[in-house]
Image (cartoon, rainbow, N blue to C red):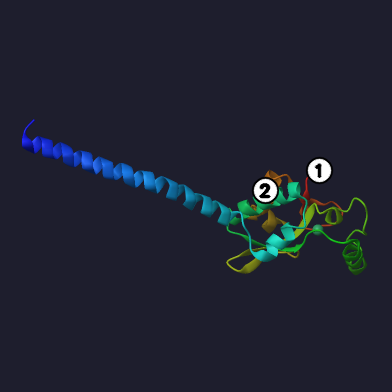
Amino acid sequence: MTATAAAAAVHVHGVELLLRRLLCNAVPLLLLLLLWLFLKMVTFPPPVESKLKTLPLDFAVRVRAWLFLCKLLGYSVIITSARRTAAEQLALHKQDKRNPAPSATNTHLLGIAVDVNFLKAGTIVLRKATEKSLWLNSGVVRAAQLCGISWGGNFSNYYDPVHFQLAS
Ligand SMILES: [Zn+2]
């Protein structure tokens, strides 16, 4: 081996070492970055988090997964109601008789239902008064179904598009 070839080999070796070192340092950093991004995606603003805390864990996990999918679709959420006390349910029933009276099977009393509005770019785009086709076209209903959550927009007796509950 000539002196020049030897020098070139050392140089290549040096570059390879540098690349390997960079990669070793970058992989853990990249993994941390991905973990941070993921946690950021499945964590919601404090008003949403405080409502999620009132739900039983199995339903809360489904709602979190669903809201994550909604976030990917570009929606942020306002949870207007989650678990309710019997008194709160009674007040709603008195306000509008289509709201069921408190009972042992009421999904809001059991904590297996949420009422939501969805926002896009800070504006509420899906609410109670929004027509069925817009809800369906948004993708949030399909996303809920994928997470084992059924939609109140399909209730036969009362169109309640803001209501989502644990699928039976
Ligand atoms: Zn509801």
Q: Residue at x 90, y 50 (%)?
A: 105
- Residue name at image x 17 percent, y 39 percent: 10
Residue 142 numbered mark, or none:
2
**Is 165 located above or below residue 82 in the figure?**
above
**Amino acid at dot 1:** Ser
Give the residue at mark 1: 168
Please state which amino acid type lies under the numbered disc 2: Arg
The residue located at (69%, 65%) in the rendering is 47
Q: Quadrant of ligand 1?
A: bottom right
Image quarter (top left, top right, bottom left or bottom right) of the C terminus: top right
Q: Position of residue 139 (x, y in %)?
A: 64, 52
- Residue 84: mark in rendering: none
In x, y percent, where is residue 17? Answer: 27, 41
Q: Residues within 10 Å of mark 2 (few under 14, many from 20)?
A: some
Which quadrant holds residue 128? bottom right
Image coords of residue 96 (percent x, y): 89, 66
**Along the viewing direction, whichever of 98 and 11 lies nearer the viewer:** 11
